[in-house]
Image (cartoon, helix red, strand yellow):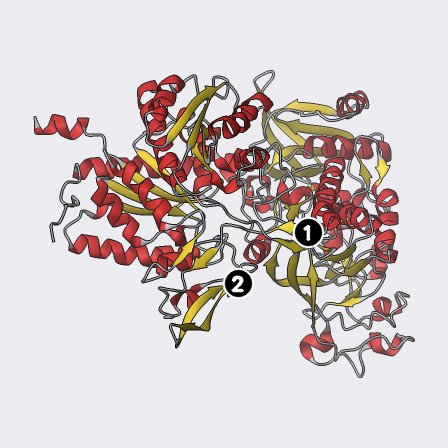
């Protein structure tokens, strides 16, 4: 029974994509009619540097089972350094989440360029598999506090 | 416009592109059920005229103040629909799009899952739209000048067009002369025009044009700013020759102690030059350059008693003290026309290039057949790396090959070397070279190994047919190996049309190498932040509709740096890039990024984190009076802000926000997408 629920489990993943590389790469996957799991829902930002690490926590609190942040490859940022900022912030946030007992498989950062439609598919598949393996997120529900 | 949001939602079918997978009616009904949505419609093509009219009509009739379009990627039609809002009398930034094509219907086959996802994406767009704000798009002046990087045929054509239109052009070329690869060619296919005859007059026009400032032997070091106002820093490398004094007489090159001993890059190493040289006689500018790596005086500090070139130069142009010079200037637009490299045939070791003297690349062969090449256009067998004394050379006439074999698709359409693409020129230049061989050595046996012959252009098929009728033998097969047997080269292959393995003996093999991105592309990418496509050529903004634009406003592409193309295509693209670059320059004004950051000075505590990390130094701390107290707060210079939002994520108090990507616009999206 437990195994059955594990395989039936369709995780819900929120992704933050930079406009110039990863969002364009995801568009390219579409133009090339690449098929991938539909579990990932994308929020477009201009740069991965805009992604406040708290967004990751917010998404998990709101019920997402996993979070993906994707930007341009190191050195290719349209805004010079935004992806480096994102990488540092993400690394710290991930360590913190791990410390809190959140499985690190739930949060992922990737570099996908505008030409990497195929890589986008791979990333999605890896993320979905990773989150499926750790199961639904239920440790982090937002509660109404009655102060 | 304030007050309660009134949202109109428009779900596009995109023919069957979306409607074939996503149940658009269900999505529309779902949209209609969302709070603040006053009208929801679906239509076959929202981007069409009647589709856009639906929106403008509804803005009028329902008093809409927000519009959500669920259709293709915003990277495709966001500008289109922003204009629609504008024509409907609404601020264009009240638009939000849900990408239900590229990121939904095209990538998910299951209609139920795709429809479900489309609903969620649409809901996320609606909740964001609710909090959108009107933005003002400011205009800045455009500097009426253009920087063109690369002086090949594409750069030359673009420079001439822009300069003729009356704008200033700075043409920066890395090598000592303009002309690029086209200058190396003998004849051009399929018309057999002499390359030099059609190119060199254009090169001279560039040099003489009052609106063109030509900088050869120069490199772009740094570019800052944005469309209309780029600040460019160029390094003019020291030539050690005074450009104003040099008359181009060539006495120095003859006198150089190393004359004829250094492989000439322009001749692909088949011809030789000295340490002071002119790449070829028709070079522009016709000024000599000293190559400091090889010059005895510059590299070793000693060149006999006095350097020979200095001795013979009557104009006194040699100046060993010359230093690199940095020049800075402002331009409004930039065209990148950096060209290509040919495939390095050493990456196909089975063909023995670099081992056998008479395995040549097509570009080397091009120099060999070129009337102004090192052999004066005589096709002869090569003896590479052998140092010959002048007398011997005269005594022994070089041998003429009796058979020449071409191999096509070397480094193109070949996954084993990572180049999946077709280089588009090799079939035809091979046919042209085969024709030239037949023309010069009528009894020479010419064989071409090919995979497919792609003769797609104007006059190409006719030319291919002509070459076959001239007695050139085409064998369909991709050779596996080249080896030496006696004094012959043997090409091992299979004729795939008859399924016969064969060993073909020949005197000379020419590898029809493909076009590859320049090995130094990285320099320009780092400076301009250009994207590359999967073949590593520069990526255009849209493969069909914006083929000369890049993702960055004001920066355009021309020629092979964007992808393999022949001369007419490169010229056409250069003219396209020139006209695209002239649009903002002719207009004189351009709209700048509106989705910039903005500081709430009431809550900013002046920590300065944002100031530190802004890559564009767009934020500074200023002193303001807060209820009688002087406090420091951050302030954004909107002309410099490019709207990345890095500062927003770093702000501890949430005081700095990026317009259209504010926390109160993104958090609702996270909320609806997070829910299972």
| Relative to A68, B295 lies left or right | right
| Relative to B556, B113 lies left or right | left
Tag 1 and tag 2, C-beta contact below 8 Å: no
x and y percent of residue B210 in the render? 86, 58
Residue B111 visible in the picture: yes
x and y percent of residue B292 in the render? 70, 71
x and y percent of residue B432 in the render? 78, 32
Closer to us: A92 or B462: A92
Q: Tell if the residue under mark 1 belongs to the same chain as the one under mark 2.
A: yes
Within 10 angstroms of label 2, few (less than 14), some, or many (20 or more) residues? some
Mark on residue B364? none
Secondary structure beneath disc 2? loop
**What residue is rendered at 40% in x and 54% in y?**
A49
Q: Is residue B323 above or below residue B275?
A: below
Ranked by sequence position, the earlier of labels 1 and 2 is: 1
- Number of on-image labels: 2
Q: CA distance from mark 1 to mark 2?
A: 19 Å
Residue B396 visible in the picture: no
Q: Is residue B49 above or below residue B96?
A: above
Quadrant containing the C terminus of chain B in the rendered view: top left
**What residue is rendered at 79% in x and 21% in y?**
B462
- What's the chain of the residue with tag 2? B
Q: Which residue is mark 2?
A: B637
- What's the chain of the residue with tag 1? B
Q: Is residue B109 above or below residue B555?
A: above
x and y percent of residue B392 in the render? 83, 57
Q: Which residue is mark 1?
A: B589
| Relative to B312, B296 lies left or right | left
Closer to us: B526 or B286: B526
Secondary structure beneath disc 1? strand
Closer to us: A4 or B358: A4
């Amino acid at each position: 029974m437990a195994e059955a629920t594990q395989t039936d489990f369709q995780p819900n993943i929120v992704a933050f994509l930079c406009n110039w590389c990863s969002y364009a790469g995801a568009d390219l996957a579409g133009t090339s009619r690449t098929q991938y799991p539909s579990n990932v829902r994308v929020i477009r930002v201009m740069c991965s540097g805009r992604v406040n690490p708290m967004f990751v926590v917010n998404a998990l609190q709101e019920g997402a089972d996993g979070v993906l942040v994707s930007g341009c490859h190191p050195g290719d940022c349209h805004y010079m350094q935004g992806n480096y900022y994102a990488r540092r912030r993400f690394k710290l946030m991930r360590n913190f989440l791990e410390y809190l007992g959140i499985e690190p498989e739930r949060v992922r950062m990737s570099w996908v360029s505008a030409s990497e439609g195929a890589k986008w598919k791979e990333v999605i598949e890896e993320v979905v598999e990773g989150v499926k393996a750790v199961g639904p997120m239920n440790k982090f529900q937002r509660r109404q506090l009655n102060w | 416009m304030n007050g309660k949001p009134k949202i109109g939602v428009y779900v596009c079918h995109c023919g069957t592109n979306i409607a074939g997978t996503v149940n658009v009616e269900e999505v529309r009904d779902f949209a209609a059920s969302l709070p603040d949505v006053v009208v929801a419609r679906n239509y076959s093509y929202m981007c069409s005229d009647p589709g856009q009219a639906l929106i403008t009509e509804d803005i009028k009739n329902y008093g809409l103040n927000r519009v959500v379009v669920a259709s293709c990627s915003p990277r495709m039609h966001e500008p289109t629909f922003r204009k629609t809002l504008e024509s409907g009398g609404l601020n264009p930034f009240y638009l939000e799009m849900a990408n239900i094509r590229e990121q939904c219907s095209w990538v998910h086959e299951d209609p139920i899952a795709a429809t479900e996802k489309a609903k969620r994406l649409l809901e996320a767009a609606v909740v964001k739209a609710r909090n959108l704000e009107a933005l003002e798009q400011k205009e800045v002046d455009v500097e009426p000048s253009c920087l063109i990087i690369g002086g090949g045929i594409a750069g030359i054509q673009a420079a001439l067009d822009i300069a003729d239109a009356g704008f200033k052009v700075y043409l920066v070329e890395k090598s000592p002369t303009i002309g690029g690869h086209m200058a190396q060619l003998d004849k051009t296919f399929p018309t057999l025009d002499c390359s030099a005859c059609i190119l060199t007059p254009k090169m001279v026009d560039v040099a003489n044009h009052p609106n063109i400032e030509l900088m050869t032997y120069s490199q772009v070091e740094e570019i800052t700013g944005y469309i209309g106002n780029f600040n460019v820093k160029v390094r003019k490398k020291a030539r050690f020759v005074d450009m104003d004094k040099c008359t181009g007489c060539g006495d120095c090159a003859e006198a150089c102690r190393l004359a004829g001993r250094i492989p000439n890059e322009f001749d692909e190493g088949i011809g030789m030059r000295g340490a002071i040289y002119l790449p070829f006689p028709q070079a522009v500018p016709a000024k000599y350059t000293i190559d400091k790596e090889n010059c005895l005086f510059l590299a070793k500090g000693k060149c006999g008693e006095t350097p020979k070139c200095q001795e013979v130069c009557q104009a006194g142009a040699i100046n060993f003290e010359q230093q690199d010079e940095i020049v800075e200037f402002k331009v409004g637009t930039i065209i990148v026309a950096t060209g290509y490299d040919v495939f390095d045939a050493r990456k196909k070791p089975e063909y023995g290039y670099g081992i056998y003297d008479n395995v040549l690349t097509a570009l080397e062969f091009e120099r060999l057949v070129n009337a102004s090449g090192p052999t004066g256009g005589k096709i002869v067998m090569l003896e590479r790396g052998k140092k010959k004394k002048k007398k011997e050379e005269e005594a022994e006439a070089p041998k003429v090959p009796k058979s020449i074999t071409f191999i096509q698709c070397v480094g193109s359409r070949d996954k084993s070397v990572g180049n999946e693409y077709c280089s588009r020129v090799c079939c035809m230049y091979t046919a042209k070279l085969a024709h030239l061989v037949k023309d010069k050595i009528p009894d020479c046996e010419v064989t071409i190994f090919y995979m497919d012959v792609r003769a797609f252009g104007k006059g190409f098929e006719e030319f291919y047919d002509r070459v076959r009728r001239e007695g050139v033998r085409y064998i369909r097969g991709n050779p596996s190996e080249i080896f030496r047997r006696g004094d012959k080269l043997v090409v091992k292959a299979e004729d795939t049309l008859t399924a016969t393995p064969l060993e073909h003996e020949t005197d000379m093999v020419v590898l029809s190498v493909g076009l590859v991105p320049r090995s130094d592309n990285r320099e320009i990418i780092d400076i301009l932040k250009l994207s590359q496509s999967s073949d590593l050529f520069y990526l255009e903004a849209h493969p069909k509709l914006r083929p000369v634009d890049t993702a960055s406003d004001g920066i355009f592409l021309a020629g092979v740096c964007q992808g393999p193309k022949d001369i007419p295509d490169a010229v056409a693209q250069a003219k396209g890039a020139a006209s695209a670059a002239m649009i903002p320059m002719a207009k004189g004004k351009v709209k700048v990024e509106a989705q910039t950051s903005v500081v709430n000075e009431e809550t900013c505590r002046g920590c300065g984190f944002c100031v530190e990390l802004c890559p564009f130094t767009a934020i500074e701390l200023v002193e303001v009076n807060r209820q009688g107290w002087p406090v420091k707060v951050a302030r954004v210079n909107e002309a410099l802000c490019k709207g990345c939002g890095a500062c927003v994520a770093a702000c501890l108090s949430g005081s700095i926000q990026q317009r259209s990507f504010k926390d109160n616009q993104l958090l609702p999206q996270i909320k609806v997408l997070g829910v299972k």
